[in-house]
Amino acid sequence: METIALIAQVQSSTAIAVGLIFAFAALGTGIGFGLLGGKFLEGASRQPELAAMLQVRMFIIAGLLDALSIIGVAFAALLLFANPLLGALG
Amino acid sequence: MSEAQFAKTVAWLLRVQALLAGVVALAFVFIGGVEQALAALIGGAIGVVLTTVSALRVGLSMGSDPQAMVSAFYRAMAFKLVLAVILFVIVAKWFAGYFGPVLMGYVATVVAYWLAMRKLAWLPGSTTENE
């Protein structure tokens, strides 16, 4: 009975952790992409001939921007589908 | 910078990502064995696939008006995130015991973006003349 309560506690804490991971990943990526797209439109409207060059740089920076959230998503997937914390309970 | 130069930059990025993933996998052969090396390779493959898919979708919008470029870019990034979730869920189920090497392989491909930024900063005409 005590083990079941512990498992339930680990699972509920994991669910909260996964929710926080997704929330902060979405928040950070959303703010970052919003700023990135806004600055791109600013630059492209000032100098339209540089739009293609700016898009290459935007693509590179976006790859760095969403890398951390993808790593967070990877950890969340691990916690959801193969939770290593439950292994400690036996 | 034209579509050809975008394609050239992306091809360079993919080559470096594959190289870095290979180096990490080789390191894991000596550290933890073939299984961990395979897991690191799969992590690297995820990074390469995500870059390829997003680059294809962004590259198709090159040359159109900025608004269409931004909307195509956002669609590409949303698709990339969804694809990342799907791939990492599959990997979490199959490689749960080797998740460290998988993540190391993926992180190695992220390093290629830093190198690409450095490479672009050294290209002639990388700063605007009107500033």
Image (cartoon, coloured by chain):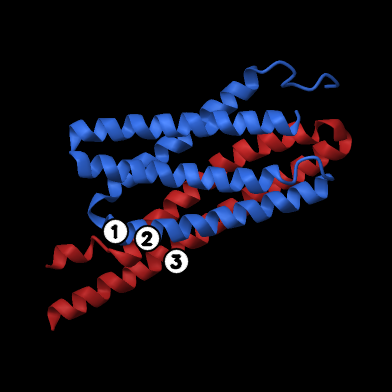
Mark 1 neighbour density, 10 Å: few (under 14) some (14–19) many (20 or more): some
Query: What residue sits right under mark 2 in the picture?
Result: B90
Whether residue A73 can be seen here = yes
Instruction: Give the image location of residue B58, x and y in percent.
Output: 68, 45
Q: Is residue A84 left or right of residue A89?
A: right
Q: Residue at x 26, y 70 (%)?
A: A10
Chain A colour as displayed: red
Q: Chain of mark 3?
A: A
Determine the chain carrying the residue at label 2. Answer: B
Residue kind at label 1, given as amino acid type: Trp
Disc number placed over residue A19 in the picture, else none: 3
- Read off the chain for label 1: B
Specify the chain shown as blue. B
Q: Which residue is mark 1?
A: B94
**Can residue A76 be seen?**
no
Above or below B79: residue B51: above
